[in-house]
Amino acid sequence: MKTTTKFSTLHEAKNQLVYSSLSKALSSASNSKQLHKIHSLIITLGLEKSIFFSGKLISKYAQLKDPTSSLSVFHQVSPTSNVFQWNSIIRALTHNGLFSKALFFNSKMQKMDVLPDKYTFPLVANSCAALLDIEMGKVVHQNVLEMGLGSDLYIGNALVDMYARFGFLAEALKVFDGMSERDVVSWNSLISGYSANGYWEEALEVYNMARMAGIMPDSFTVSSVLPACGGLMHVKEGEIVHCLVEKIGLHSDVVVSNGLLSMYFKFNRLVDARRIFDEMMVRDSVSWNTLICGYSQMELFKESTECFMLMLNSFKPDLLTITSVLRACGHLRDLEFGKFVHDYMKKSGYQCDVTADNILIDMYAKCGDLLASWEVFDRMICKDSVSWNSMINCYIQYGNYDEALKLSKIMKVDLKVDSITYVMLLSVSTQLADKELGKEFHCDVIKFGFDSDLIVNNSMADMYAKCGQINDSLKIFENMKTHDRVTWNTIITACVQSGDFTLGLRMINQMRTEGVMPDVATVLGILPMCSFFAAKRQGKEIHGCIFRFGFESDIPIGNALIEMYSKCGNLKNSWQVFDRMKVRDVVTWTAMISAYGMYGEGKKAVGAFEDMKATGVIPDHVAFVAIIYACSHSGLVEEGLACFDQMQKDYNLEPRIEHYACVVDLLSRSGLLSKAEEFIYSMPLKPNASIWGSLLSACRSSGNIEVAERVSERILELKSNDTGYYVLVSNVYAILGKWDQVRMIRKSIKARGLKKDPACSWIEIKRRLYVFGTGDKFFEQFEEVNKLLGIISGLMAKEGYVADLRCVLHDVEEDEKRDLLCGHSERLAIAFGLLNTKPGTPLQIMKNLRVCGDCHTVTKYISMIMQREILVRDANRFHVFKDGTCSCGDHW
DNA sequence: CTAGGGTTAG
């Protein structure tokens, strides 16, 4: 009896020693190999089926990321396993991301009539959350309630988290509110739920409630609330959280520091972000990714790629690193680096990530390698909407619209289209100015339910405006529930481009009352309006704003300012803006060349054109239009023809109809009418109304009636919708005295529903704009103006002036014709200006149509008799009259 | 039981 007891005690003592040393060894095993050794030992000792060791082995293998071994241990015991072993295997699977297997074992356990306990549910809820298995999740919740475990803290926390991951924040809140006991994890789960689903305001609100409830935030709390501060751009709140982090010593937590880093990048606070990164004691790959991605977001792409190279020294980049840096490659157009990263990706076995492949498509397209884009797209096994959109976008960028439309049709069949697809497709119809195509897309947008999307609506408003359907554009605008800055910019530009400046101004005011700040695009939208009104003062005010907002180094802004000042009659300011620009693109040079052209400074235009080429800027189609136009307005026939030649020979540019029109203009303005006509017949393109129109205007000035009649017939054949050409033709018939024809044309203009713009001129005196129409009698000082014009015409007659009655386009008596000429709006404006300014002050007159020949002559006389410099801007160009001559040298 | 970093468009 004694010995047995002794023996049993000894046996137990031995066993206890084995147990404790094995248990110690198990806990300290740091890799799978060590663990396998201990495992063999346990098997040798015949202990592998003990509840304690089997459970320990399952968890330990799981901890060392070897769930297969966990499973094999479990299978050894499975017929007899109890809830402890089941929980171990479910936990092993859950912690290794094998969620569906975890759920499978959960149902198997129930089939074996083993009841789950309070440790099972959090694990199962976790798996449901990860798999987004909503049905199963609800069943689990139900089971919890049935088993009376509804008040368990851990289970409650798991359920809050599960519903939050489903995006069911209302359910999550309901569980949270129903909990009898809450800890920091409960609050964290709710905060992160709101934060991860983009409900940033709610996340912050719950965070503040937690603080008021006396909860001390931990690293989880902070890293859930930081993205909310960043997303809302709540700099103050973010800084308060940052202070708290320092105070309670959470900054040594790498996740918290990464959160701060990301937040400061969102605030565009590069210096703070960099300091956080530099002062981090421990960095992980997320820190590097946040840095690389942050630089990318701030468009510091070079820094982004440099950080990637630095990161290679200490970390293996993952897919997120690669996608961030590929984005930078695209923006840098650095094909070589892009290929380097792509190779790295292949070597590291990262080929099958949809997001990474999508960025590759975009990167190759941006770097100019469309074929490589296609290869990536073609090879992808699963393509998502972004893949298709990116590929379509490639084709659009390369102008291959047919291929883009073809792909979108396949997408439509597969129901893969999204709002972004339509934003891109709408941009195609906008670029083609194809309103029928645009309408088709509009129908699709309604059909697929994208018509409440802000960006889609902005695109549609822009599309209709650029297709000339301003009313449809406004209709879209009126139906929109929210407007952002782009909406306003689109609609303001639409108003300005359709010529409705009054509405444009109203929109700007409305934009400001809604508290939307203007940006570069807003300014670009309204500058043409200043040009039209020649509102130098308003233009200068806007120029001031540009400085205040810091837009002055923006190239498109500089370009628009050059154009604005030149159209406002201030060539000097144009040149000053041009001179101050540090970087000039082809548009900058073209704007300056056009400006010179409008003022008849042909020689300077040619000089600028040469300078442009010398600085390495390659002229495009538009630049050639500008230079030939400039030559034509200064009578530089040789130079103009040389340019036309050059564009084909040296620059391989196919001349377009507008280039031919410029050459016709060039020849005919210089009186080479037969040469011009010959040129028209030799062109490979079908001449349009503008080509014949140029020749016809020249015929009128030089009085070549024979050619004029022939050309008039050609123009009428074309049945153009532009009233200008009918007016021109009718003027020719008026000069010829063919009044029947004149009446016929006027009737046909009316019959076709066209309207002739009534002529008007305007002048700004002391910050007020005075507008005059033809034959106006009802303005202040009409009597004085009329008297002054009478005196002037007496003085002119002494100098040898004879009225050019051909400029009167009505069938009336000669005396009456003389009176009609005196009523031309520009003369009224000039006389009004002479009366209301001090002697010697230069005058500036604007006219919406072209100046007639007689007025041109009269203005020359006035500039001499009254000793005034008079600047007249007509629909086409500027005339500077001084001492009896005009800057245009009569080339107009 | 709870946390951080990635793609296409106007």
Image (cartoon, coloured by chain):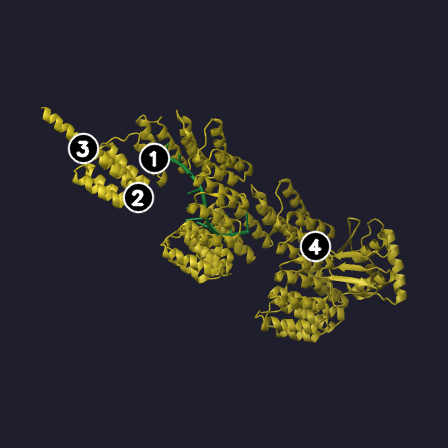
Chain colours: A yellow, B green
Q: Secondary structure at mark 1?
A: helix
What amino acid is found at the position of numbered circle 3 in the picture? Asn
Q: Secondary structure at mark 4?
A: helix
Q: Chain of mark 1?
A: A
Q: Which residue is mark 4?
A: A531
Q: Earlier in the sequence, mark 2 or mark 1?
A: 2
**Which is nearer the N-term, disc 3 or disc 2?**
3
Provide residue B3's location: percent of width, then percent of height. 42, 39
- Residue A555 pos. (x, y %): 62, 56
Residue hosting label 2: A65
Foreground mark, 2 or 4?
A: 2
Task: Determine the chain carrying the residue at label 2.
Answer: A
Residue at image coords 67%, 59%: A578
* Mark 3 chain: A
How many numbered marks are there?
4
* Chain identifier of the residue bearing label 4 in the image: A
